[in-house]
Image (tube, rainbow, N blue to C red):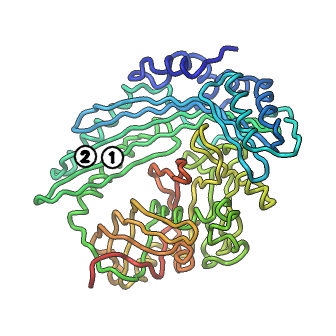
């Protein structure tokens, strides 16, 4: 069975990157055999061949990882190809490809984790990495690895064409078309910048309790920024679409949206005002404003923060934390959504997990360590940035379920307040849940109507308090469509979030003095 070391892999991978996203030596057999997006057929033998390993080698590495007395070990293989094509100054002038390839070996002994990785998938390199991980997480138990059995998983992100079969010549027209549409929509437009990004990640996970799982994980993003000028004043805004999608995602309708939304969001800022600051009713728009839910509330429900008594929710399990019409889930099974996963990075099935049901906190998000601590089953939230990183409990697609009200009803109920449509930068203190978020776009609500657009304002508050102060939830839940990435302890993973239109009775808005 042929194997490649890191140097050979990179050497081959660097050839012809401007013309094909997958090197020819991989495109010819292993990658194609590993997964065909149009059929969804998967073969364990093909997955082994893709990484140049077999059952006997993996079992030997796991055995080495457990030789110092660990309770559990897993081996995580990853091969990831990322392609970037950029347009600026009306010309496609930037393109590059990144190839990541290696294996991480983890050993658990109670709450202790030993982790090591190598960029060379050879028996010698894996044995050395296993010995290193074993030395970090020592224990007194003697655990023998069992025979590996395929852990079959569903496919929540079927695509028609894998990204390895899409040449750069098929991508460039999308950027040019979007750019042309942007300049045609408004004469005030000065500049646009567009990035087309696609990824293919192949993973293979084997565990000491006998599970082996593998997955092909596609991802794409087109990110558009627009700059316009009016009466000597410049404004800039952006719009993007992302998901676990193939190139068929970029339909004429979505291409039109990328252009029109970026222009609309930009030119609206010419009429925007900065409102008076202070405590006021705030309506969070359906969709991407779910970032506030993700950051200010969701992180506090990740089990490691609660296991370590960092989160404010550490002693709230089974208790009311919101109105009875508020329910929140974290879901990895939404078809083709950016945060969805068929299987997590510990070979645990993805699932829909209710965090809050009818106002009551009913679950945290668990990986293997926290599940063992709380004596519950893992929820499929064990995630890592890459083979270089160990697992943490992480969100997938976190959103609030629809409620009993309507958007119109909510807006009409506000005498004077803020309608927050999209957010950018923010800071959150996980322990107490205090946050500050920058509102990129939104509107004033005056006498039950959306009136003037707003800009350059912050909202300041406390996540758990905001959850308690949600007094109306609409029936229009939307998942965010953009390329959201979540950071935690130095690791970045793709996520999404969502929200119906929601009314919060009081949040501090940082505006001008009255």
Whether label 1 touches label 2, CB < 8 Å: yes
Query: Does 317 appear above or below 340?
Result: below
Residue at 64% across, 60% down: 302
The front one of 485 and 419 is: 485
Q: Residues within 10 Å of mark 1 (few under 14, many from 20)?
A: many
The front one of 350 and 318 is: 318
> Residue 6 vs residue 409: left or right?
right
Q: Residues within 10 Å of mark 2 (few under 14, many from 20)?
A: many
- Figure quadrant of residue 318: bottom right
The front one of 77 and 283 is: 77
- Outermost residue toward the left? 231
Q: Nearer the viewer, mark 1 or mark 2?
A: 1
Task: Name the quarter where the N terminus is drawn.
Answer: top right
Number of callouts in the render?
2
In percent of width and height, residue 322 lies at 61, 77
In percent of width and height, residue 229 lies at 16, 55
> Residue 438 vs residue 129: left or right?
left
Judging from the image, what secondary structure is the residue with disc 2 in? Answer: helix
Residue at 51% across, 74% down: 462
Q: Which mark is residue 224?
A: 1
Can see residue 151? no
Residue at 61% across, 34% down: 216
In percent of width and height, residue 477 lies at 52, 64
Residue at 75% across, 53% down: 111
Looking at the image, is mark 1 or mark 2 earlier in the sequence?
2
Whole-number angstrom distance, CA of label 1 to CA of label 2: 10 Å
Residue to which mark 2 is pinned:
182
């Amino acid at each position: 069975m042929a194997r490649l070391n890191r140097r050979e892999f990179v050497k081959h991978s660097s050839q012809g990157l401007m013309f094909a996203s997958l090197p020819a030596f991989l495109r010819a057999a292993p990658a194609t055999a590993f997964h065909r997006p149009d059929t969804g057929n998967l073969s364990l033998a093909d997955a082994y061949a893709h990484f140049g390993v077999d059952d006997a080698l993996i079992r030997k590495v796991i055995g080495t990882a457990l030789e110092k007395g660990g309770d559990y070990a897993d081996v995580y293989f990853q091969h990831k190809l990322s392609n970037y094509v950029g347009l600026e100054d009306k010309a496609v002038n930037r393109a590059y490809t990144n190839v990541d390839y290696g294996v991480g070996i983890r050993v658990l002994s109670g709450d202790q984790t030993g982790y090591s990785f190598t960029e060379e998938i050879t028996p010698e390199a894996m044995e050395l990495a296993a010995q290193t991980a074993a030395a970090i997480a020592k224990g007194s138990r003697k655990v023998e690895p069992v025979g590996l059995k395929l852990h079959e998983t569903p496919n929540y992100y079927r695509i028609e064409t894998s990204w390895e079969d899409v040449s750069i010549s098929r991508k460039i027209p999308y950027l040019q078309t979007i750019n042309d549409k942007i300049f045609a929509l408004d004469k005030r437009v000065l500049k646009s910048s567009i990035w087309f990004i696609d990824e293919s990640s192949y993973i293979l996970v084997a565990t000491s309790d006998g599970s082996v799982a593998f997955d092909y994980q596609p991802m794409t993003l087109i990110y558009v920024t627009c700059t316009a000028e009016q009466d000597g004043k410049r404004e800039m805004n952006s719009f993007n679409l992302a998901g676990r999608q193939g190139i068929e995602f970029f339909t004429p309708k979505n291409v039109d949206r990328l252009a029109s939304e970026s222009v609309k969001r930009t030119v609206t800022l010419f009429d925007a005002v900065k409102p008076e600051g202070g405590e006021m009713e705030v309506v969070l728009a359906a969709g991407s404003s779910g970032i506030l839910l993700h950051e200010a509330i969701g992180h506090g429900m990740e089990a490691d923060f609660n296991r370590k008594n960092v989160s404010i929710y550490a002693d709230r399990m089974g208790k009311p934390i919101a109105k009875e019409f508020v329910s929140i889930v974290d879901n990895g099974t939404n078809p083709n959504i950016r945060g969805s996963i068929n299987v997590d990075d510990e070979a645990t099935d993805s699932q829909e997990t209710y965090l809050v049901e009818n106002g009551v906190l009913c679950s945290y998000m668990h990986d293997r360590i926290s599940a063992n601590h709380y004596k519950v089953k893992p929820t499929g939230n064990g995630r890592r940035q890459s083979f270089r990183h160990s697992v943490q409990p992480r969100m997938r697609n976190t959103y609030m379920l629809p409620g009993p009200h309507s958007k119109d009803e909510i807006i009409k109920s506000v005498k004077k307040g803020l309608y927050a449509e999209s957010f950018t930068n923010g800071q959150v203190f996980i322990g107490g849940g205090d946050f500050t978020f920058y509102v990129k776009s939104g509107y004033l609500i005056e006498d039950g109507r959306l009136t003037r657009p707003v800009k350059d304002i912050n909202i300041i508050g406390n996540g758990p308090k905001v959850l308690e102060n949600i007094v109306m939830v609409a029936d229009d839940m939307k998942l965010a469509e953009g390329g959201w990435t979540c950071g935690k302890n130095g690791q970045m993973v793709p996520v999404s979030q969502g929200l119906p239109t929601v009314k919060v009775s009081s949040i501090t808005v940082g505006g001008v003095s009255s």
